[in-house]
Amino acid sequence: MKITVLPPWGADVTESYAERYWLPTIGPTGYLMMHKLLRLDGCDYDRVILAVGLGVTLKVLDHTFQRLMTFGLVSINPVGMTVNVHRWPEAKLAHIERLEARTRELADA
């Protein structure tokens, strides 16, 4: 399967924004996996190499991939045999409301 990075939906958010709003939600492994996938546009997706690069087992990699799919950050196109990676989207208000109080305060600033 090839990795395809899709154009951003919503604003093209900054790295600090992604760290502030997405890291607490998808976790550190998901955050690092997104960074890796965003840099691999057009490359072949190899689970074993990606797992080794992240320092995780295949079970953890699959769980992380599912988590990213749950939040719409990645998807699989079985017809084109591609892994679609969406650039960091803006966090929804409901998403922000679930974050810790300090993070919410920063969002309101």
Image (cartoon, rainbow, N blue to C red):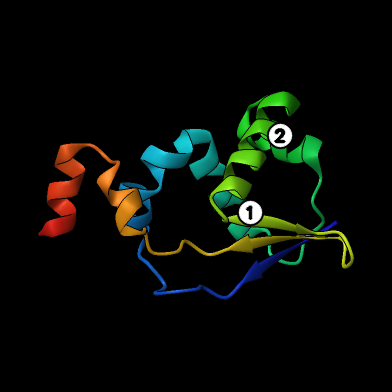
Left or right of 28 on screen, residue 64 = right
Residue displayed at 53% across by 35% down = 29
Please tell me whether residue 102 is drawn above or below residue 109 in the rendered image: above
Q: Secondary structure at mark 2?
A: helix
Question: Looking at the picture, which amino acid does disc 2 mark?
Answer: Asp
The tag earlier along the polypeptide, 2 or 1, is 1
Image location (x, y in percent) of residue 37: 63, 54
Q: Nearer the viewer, residue 42 or 68?
A: 68
Q: Secondary structure at mark 1?
A: helix
Please tell me whether residue 19 is drawn above or below residue 100 in the rendered image: below
Which residue is denoted by mark 1 in the rendering? 37
Left or right of 101 on screen, residue 37 = right
Question: Looking at the picture, which amino acid does disc 1 mark?
Answer: Leu
Residue displayed at 63% across by 49% down = 69
Image location (x, y in percent) of residue 42: 75, 67
In this view, which residue lies farthest toward the front? 94
Density class for disc 2 (Cα within 10 Å; few <14, some 14-19, many ≥20) is: some
For the C terminus, the image quarter is: bottom left
Which residue is denoted by mark 2 in the rendering? 62
